[in-house]
């Protein structure tokens, strides 16, 4: 008995040691990001780059404040743009994608197989291939230089569809039928039964979509011309063009990643726990 | 109203489904189907430079002949990128599955591990990661031979060969780890969703850990296994830093060879399609076989 327990304990220790080692590796970029944000100018340009900061300073943050207050567009404007675009995109994506996945799987309208195949094909096409025609479509619709140019093309994402569809397939049909027999309307079934049960799927989608939109550099660069409409990743770039502002950039980079990390920290428990208790499986 | 009453249950059901699908389909048509069709046309021609806007002059197979025959840069790039995907994908998927199984068993500090393992994804998609890579996070800082993490005396003691092997080992671990965070989270949520009753009954029947993995865990996570494999392949194919894509983008932007770029894009797309087709045939059929496995849900 004791031998068995000893074996069990030692294997647990091994698991934890491996985990800690992997955690160290994974956390490296973040640690580097944080330590760089506090590096004085003399340490920023050392080659090879040093991992840890020797003489931490807050000067980068005050430099950042200075750079931001001297720019023509107040930085709160960039923040407003980023938050507005991200929130609208995320909310609409979650609703449209969940509705579509539920409609396709549980109502299976004619041609649903074809649509699913097209969506799978859409997964595989890299955005660069369709870039130019896509720009022309957005141009034709008169969306260039508006928030809609970033939001609308992002809404029908094949990857999120695929993700939610895998979860919808596991929902028991009996539950929907029971609700229908009890006289629940279609909208009632979707909002009160399907969405709560799909919570792990759409919370996951919400995180991915938030991260993707928040960090998106390319589409704001291409579709927005007005400086006052640009988002934080682009603003970050403009800060970096000033001389001796490398410190300010590293401080800004750190601040920019904070929302995504906080969001994930808050919601990961939600994702995991609803997964277990939602009755989707088991 | 009368007309609606006459519709059968089945028709009504599919109409509702179609209604739910509509917004997504509109988006798909406008921003995927139309662009992809016009890029297919473009690949058989080039932009008409005399007209303003999007007018295509068809030239037949010129662009494709150029990609396979004339251009000496394209095929080696395509080959290298295919090879790296074929090697990388199983590594990433298997690694993230093993890590997810380990994580699902951990009792203390669950939230901490999950957050840390998803960090590369949170950092990895945007301007931030590009900036970090520019500063050499993956090559110079982590490389042990010139970093400050391990003292120089230790390295001298180990000798150059061992240091080089360790360097390669660590950098590949890091590369795989940074690519597998999304897969890890999806696997983890799938594993945590497996009913504990299944494992208990397997234990009572005397199954060991090895059998439990093959007979319970793997079949139960097989839908996610498919999702993850496809996702891994696609992210590495559509990664901005991918060799082929940078070459295509260069051709579009710098040399304004739109037709040729579209043709290369299509060759690339068909290569991806073939690989994903194989994945669907193997893992997809495995996943379908296991649907409804593990008793009534």
Image (cartoon, coloured by chain):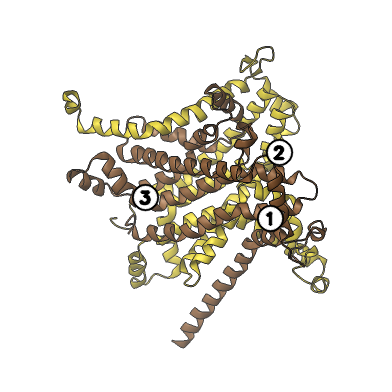
Chain colours: A brown, B yellow
Instruction: Give me the C-alpha separation between circle 3 and circle 1.
Output: 38 Å
Q: Is residue B132 visible?
A: no
The quadrant in which residue B44 appears is: top right
Q: Which residue is mark 1?
A: A251
Q: Is residue B146 above or below residue B22?
A: below
Front residue of A242/A15: it is A242
Q: Measuring 40% from the left and 41% from the top, which residue is drawn there? A: A95
Disc number for residue A198:
3
Q: Position of residue A196 (x, y in %)?
A: 33, 51
Q: Which residue is mark 2?
A: B77
Q: Residues within 10 Å of mark 2 (few under 14, many from 20)?
A: some
Share a chain, discs 3 and 1?
Answer: yes
Instruction: Give me the C-alpha separation between circle 2 and circle 1.
Output: 37 Å
Q: Chain of mark 3?
A: A
Q: Position of residue B279 (x, y in %)?
A: 51, 44
Residues at marks 3 and 1 touching, judged by CB atoms closer than 8 Å: no
The mark closer to the camera, 2 or 1, is: 1
Front residue of B106/B276: it is B106
Q: Position of residue A69 (x, y in %)?
A: 68, 47
């Amino acid at each position: 008995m004791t031998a068995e327990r000893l074996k069990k304990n030692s294997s647990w220790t091994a698991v934890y040691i491996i985990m800690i080692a992997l955690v160290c590796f994974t956390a490296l970029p973040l640690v580097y990001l944080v330590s760089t944000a506090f590096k004085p100018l003399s340490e920023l340009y050392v080659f090879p780059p040093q991992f840890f900061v020797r003489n931490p300073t807050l000067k980068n943050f005050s430099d950042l404040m200075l750079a931001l207050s001297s720019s023509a567009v107040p930085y709160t404007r960039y923040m407003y743009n980023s938050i507005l675009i991200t929130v609208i995109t995320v909310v609409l994506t979650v609703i449209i994608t969940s509705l579509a996945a539920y409609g396709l799987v549980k109502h299976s309208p004619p041609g649903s197989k074809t649509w699913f195949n097209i969506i799978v094909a859409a997964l595989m096409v890299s955005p660069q291939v369709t870039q130019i025609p896509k720009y022309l479509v957005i141009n034709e619709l008169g969306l260039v230089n508006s928030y809609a140019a970033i939001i609308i093309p992002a809404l029908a994402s094949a990857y999120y569809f695929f993700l939610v569809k895998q979860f919808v397939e596991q929902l028991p049909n009996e539950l929907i039928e029971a609700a229908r027999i009890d006289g629940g309307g279609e909208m009632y079934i979707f909002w009160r039964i399907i969405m709560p049960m799909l919570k792990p799927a759409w919370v996951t989608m919400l995180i991915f979509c938030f991260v993707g939109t928040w960090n998106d550099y390319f589409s704001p660069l291409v579709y927005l011309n007005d400086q006052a409409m640009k988002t934080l990743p682009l603003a970050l770039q403009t800060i970096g063009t000033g001389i001796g502002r490398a410190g300010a950039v590293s401080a800004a980079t750190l601040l920019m990643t904070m929302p995504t990390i906080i969001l994930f920290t808050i919601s990961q428990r939600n994702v995991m726990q609803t997964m277990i208790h939602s009755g989707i499986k088991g | 109203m009368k007309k609606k009453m006459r519709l059968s249950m089945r028709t009504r059901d599919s109409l509702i489904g179609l209604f739910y699908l509509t917004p997504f389909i509109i988006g798909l048509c406008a921003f995927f189907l139309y662009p992809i069709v016009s890029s297919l046309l473009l690949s058989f021609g080039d932009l008409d430079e005399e007209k303003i806007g999007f007018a295509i002059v068809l030239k037949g197979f010129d662009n494709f002949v150029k990609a396979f025959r004339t251009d000496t840069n394209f095929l080696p790039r395509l080959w290298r990128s295919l090879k790296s995907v074929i090697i990388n994908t199983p590594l990433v998927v298997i690694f993230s599955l093993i890590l997810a199984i380990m994580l699902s068993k951990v009792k203390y500090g669950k939230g901490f591990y999950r957050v840390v393992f998803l960090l590369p994804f949170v950092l990895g998609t945007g301007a931030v990661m590009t900036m970090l890579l520019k500063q050499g996070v993956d090559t110079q800082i982590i490389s042990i031979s010139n970093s400050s993490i391990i003292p120089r005396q230790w390295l001298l003691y180990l000798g150059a060969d061992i240091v080089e092997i360790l360097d390669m080992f660590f950098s590949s671990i890091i590369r795989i780890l940074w690519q597998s965070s999304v897969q890890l989270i999806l696997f983890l949520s799938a594993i945590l969703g497996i009913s504990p009753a299944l494992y208990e009954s397997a234990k009572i029947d005397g199954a060991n850990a090895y059998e439990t993995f093959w007979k319970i865990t793997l079949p139960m996570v097989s839908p996610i296994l498919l999702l993850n494999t496809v996702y891994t392949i696609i992210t590495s194919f559509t990664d901005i830093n991918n060799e082929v894509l940078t070459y295509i983008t260069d051709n579009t932007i710098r040399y304004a060879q739109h037709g040729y770029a579209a043709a290369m894009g299509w060759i690339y797309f068909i290569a991806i399609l073939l690989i994903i087709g194989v994945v669907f045939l193997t893992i997809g059929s495995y996943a379908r076989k296991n649907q409804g496995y593990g008793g009534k849900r």
